Every structure is written in C-alpha cells, then in structure tokens.
Amino acid sequence: MKTLRILLVFSMILATQAQLYGQEYPYLSNPGDLTGVTQESGITVPVTVTVVYDNYIHTPEMKPDWGYSIVIEGLEKTVLFDAGTKPDIFKSNFEKTGLNASSIDLLVFSHQHYDHVGGIEAFAKMKTGIPVIIPHSFTHSFIKSMADDGFQPVLARDATMICRNLYTSGEFDFQIPEQCLILDTKDGLVVMTGCSHPGIVRMLKEIRRIFNKDIAAVFGGFHLMNKSKQEMEEIIREMKALGVVKCGATHCTGDQQIKMFSEAFGDNYFRLGVGNTIVFQ
C-alpha cells in the first residue's frame, strides 16, 4: 500500500509538471496558415539575409568560427535564426554587419547544438522581451533558460506561419530534433537550414509535400561531411529533381561537398560566409 501511495504521488507530480509545462510555454499554432501558399503567392519586396556567424569568411574584418547564424530582413518581422557558438564572436560580428539589435522582432532556433545556440548570451545583452520559436523537443532546462533570460518561448511542432511569407517547417522527428525556415517567393520556396541533421533531401521532400509548392532555393548547413562522391551525386540529383534551382552550402556541409555543390549549380550557386548578404525577390 505504501508503494502504491508513492507511485500515485509521483504520477501526480509528473502530471502537474506536464500541465505547467504546457501552460508556461505555448505552442505556435495557426490552423489553416498553409492555405496562403499557392503557386502565385510570395514576397513582393526584396528580402535580405545577412550571415552573422559561419566557419567561412566573406568580409575580412569579421571573424569566422564553427557555427551558424543569419538575420532575415524585409518581412513583417526581422528574424534572427540561430546564434552561433561563442558570445564574443557573435557580438563582434553582429556589430560589424551594421545590424541593429533593436530591430530584431523574433528569434528562431533550428536545433539545440552549441554551435547554433551558444552565442545567445551575447544577444540577450542586446535585446530581450521578444518571442523565441523553439522545436518542442528541446530540453525543458534550455527552454526555461530562455524564459529566465527575458525571452518568450513559443514551441514549434507543426509547419506554421511565423509572419506573412515566412514559415517554420515544424520539427522534424529525428534523434536530433530540428526545424528550418521557409520563405515563400513567386519563384518557389526558399528553404533556410541550420544543420539538416534529419537529412537535407528528406527535409526538402517533406517540405515540398506539406507546402505543395516547388523549392526554388535552399541554403545553410547540410551536414554532409562524411558523404562520398557517389552519395553526393545522388543528393544533388534528388535536390534538382525537387526543383531546386539555386543553392548555397556552408557550415557543416564539408569542404569537398561544398565544392561539388558549387560545380553542380554553377552560376546558381551562391557562397555564404560571415558578412555576406543574399537578396531574394
């Protein structure tokens, strides 16, 4: 009987924690959002992506380091996607881009790896009080730390609109939970990845299915460092079969693999690197 009472109390504690977890951190949920994505829909003004953190260099006065972070401007909301690895490098690079932290409306994390969340300490000293969209399988301690730092955690599980023409893919169910961002343009979808741990082709196929629109471009980390030449040729073939016209590979993709993407996409390949900007219109 004593054991039963202990089990009942333990169950009540777990139930209470689960209830508080759901109440404390709301889910990003807007049913019907994706109906706005059509073959004719998309941005009507240019959208600029600035690379704040990357292990490749574009602007000499900035510092490369293993990690990734970009800022997306030109939409209803200005978005910081990931925050790199080291707070001091993030701070220095962010300031040298000329970006203004006060203009950032929203923070989004792709996945809970140090090279994508480590620099948040620096950004938290620049600005807080804004929503941070986090895959719902992130650890509770990390989500709580965001709230403790003054951010407003919002959990992402399904593909949902973040603001007009910008969407989260929702969380990909994988041993490393991950989400990416999707920009709707009249030429097709632009997919922005963090590391693509679930598999870049798998992710693109699922996005194509969910949004029912061709993928015009994809860029970010593709996590293909261990892929052979034959495997890479198949990945490139499948990406092109999905309609991908433009590509930019960086961060965890691998040097030789980046070279293969560059050769395969030719003039439609664009380099990233710290300090670079890419404009979509």
Image (cartoon, rainbow, N blue to C red):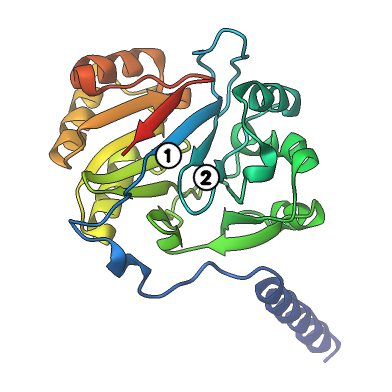
Residue ID at (53%, 67%): 28
Residue ID at (27%, 17%): 262
Where on the picture, by quarter, is residue 246?
top left
Instruction: Where is residue 25? Give x, y as percent.
Output: 67, 68
Q: Name, please, the residue furthest toward the left.
A: 241
Q: Quadrant of the C terminus?
A: top left
Instruction: Where is residue 110? Give x, y as percent.
Output: 52, 45
Does residue 262 appear to the left or right of 180 in the view shown? left
Q: Secondary structure at mark 2?
A: loop
> Which dot marks residue 110?
2
Residue ID at (69%, 79%): 19
On the question of residue 222 being in view, the answer is no
Residue count near mark 2 (Cα–Cα under 10 Å), binned few <14, some 14–19, many ≥20:
many
Residues at marks 1 and 2 touching, judged by CB atoms closer than 8 Å = yes
Q: Secondary structure at mark 1?
A: strand
Does residue 74 appear to the left or right of 242 in the view shown? right
Q: Name, please, the residue furthest toward the top.
A: 60
Instruction: Where is residue 140? Give x, y as percent.
Output: 70, 59
Q: Amino acid at mark 1?
A: Thr
Residue ID at (73%, 52%): 146
Q: Name, please, the residue furthest toward the bottom.
A: 1
- Residue assigned mark 1: 193
Where on the picture, by quarter, is residue 130?
bottom right
Count of marks overlaid on the render: 2
As rendered, which of 108 and 2 lies closer to the eye?
108
Instruction: Where is residue 223? Give x, y as percent.
Output: 42, 30
Q: Name, please, the residue furthest toward the right.
A: 2
Q: Amino acid at mark 2?
A: Ser
